[in-house]
Image (cartoon, rainbow, N blue to C red):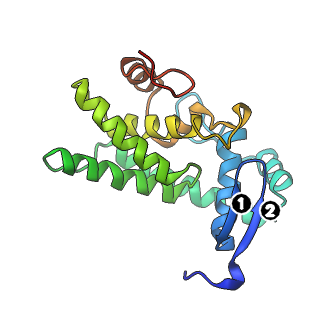
């Protein structure tokens, strides 16, 4: 859908500022930011929980949006994310050959993730992905794309100065969305010397 002046709005909430973005996209960002940061939507088997009236009510109240907007946004997200995660778990990832090809494909999947859930700063995430790829090459360590995506978003989120500690994306939500196990995530994080604050230490 093309952007129009009529749809351009400016909103401010506790998570981020929205400027000149189509209303539907802004609502999606608002709803999913709250969903990722304040509601635990993953169960113990890393699957999406059933959407309850309580969760919907929490988002409606916090974001001041109609219930149908929240329901449509969350259901669309769960449908798209489930399909995407399924493909990632099956290993349906084409890498090609050469460093540039690997980075290009990693960026492709990061872009897909952001389109499904625009809950992180995409330009900064691209930069962090490029840095991560250099660190992986230096350590001769290449985890699955699921782990790379989870680490990239984790680092981007934890180093976003506009987000406070109590507003970080819940780790379990992030790992479920990226189809990354807790073991793979923390093993890679420690191997690459990334601390819990998303900083690289030596």
Q: In this figure, which residue is indicated by the disc labeled 1? A: 71
Q: Looking at the picture, how far across and down is residue 122, in whole percent?
A: 50, 53
Please give the name of the residue rendered at 24% of the width and 27% of the height, measured from the top-left corner: 138
Q: In this figure, which residue is indicated by the disc labeled 2? A: 67
Q: CA distance from mark 2 to mark 1?
A: 6 Å
Q: Is residue 175 above or below residue 78?
A: above
2 with respect to 103 (left or right)? right
Q: Residue furthest top?
A: 202
Kindly state the secondary structure of the residue where label 1 is placed: helix
179 with respect to 171 (left or right)? left
Please give the name of the residue rendered at 28% of the width and 35% of the height, measured from the top-left corner: 134
Labels 2 & 1 near each other (Cβ < 8 A): yes
Q: Looking at the picture, how far across and down is residue 22, in whole percent?
A: 64, 74
Q: Looking at the picture, how far across and down is residue 130, in whole percent?
A: 34, 43
Q: Is residue 132 visible?
A: yes
Q: Quadrant of the N terminus?
A: bottom right
């Amino acid at each position: 859908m093309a952007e129009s002046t009529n749809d351009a709005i400016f909103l401010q909430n506790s998570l981020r500022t929205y400027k000149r973005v189509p209303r539907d996209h802004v609502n999606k960002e608002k709803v999913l930011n709250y969903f990722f940061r304040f509601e635990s939507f993953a169960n113990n088997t890393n699957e999406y929980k059933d959407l309850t009236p309580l969760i919907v009510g929490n988002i409606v109240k916090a974001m001041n949006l109609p219930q149908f907007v929240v329901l449509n946004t969350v259901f669309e997200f769960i449908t798209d994310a489930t399909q995407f995660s399924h493909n990632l778990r099956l290993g349906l990832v084409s890498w090609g050959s050469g460093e540039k090809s690997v980075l290009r494909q990693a960026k492709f999947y990061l872009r897909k993730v952001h389109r499904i859930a625009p809950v992180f700063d995409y330009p900064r995430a691209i930069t962090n992905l490029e840095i991560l790829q250099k660190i992986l090459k230096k350590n001769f360590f290449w985890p699955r794309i699921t782990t790379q995506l989870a680490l990239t978003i984790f680092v981007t989120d934890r180093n976003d100065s506009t987000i406070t500690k109590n507003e970080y994306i819940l780790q379990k939500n992030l790992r479920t969305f990226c189809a990354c196990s807790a073991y793979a995530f923390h093993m890679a994080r420690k191997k690459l010397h990334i601390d819990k604050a998303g900083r690289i230490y030596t």
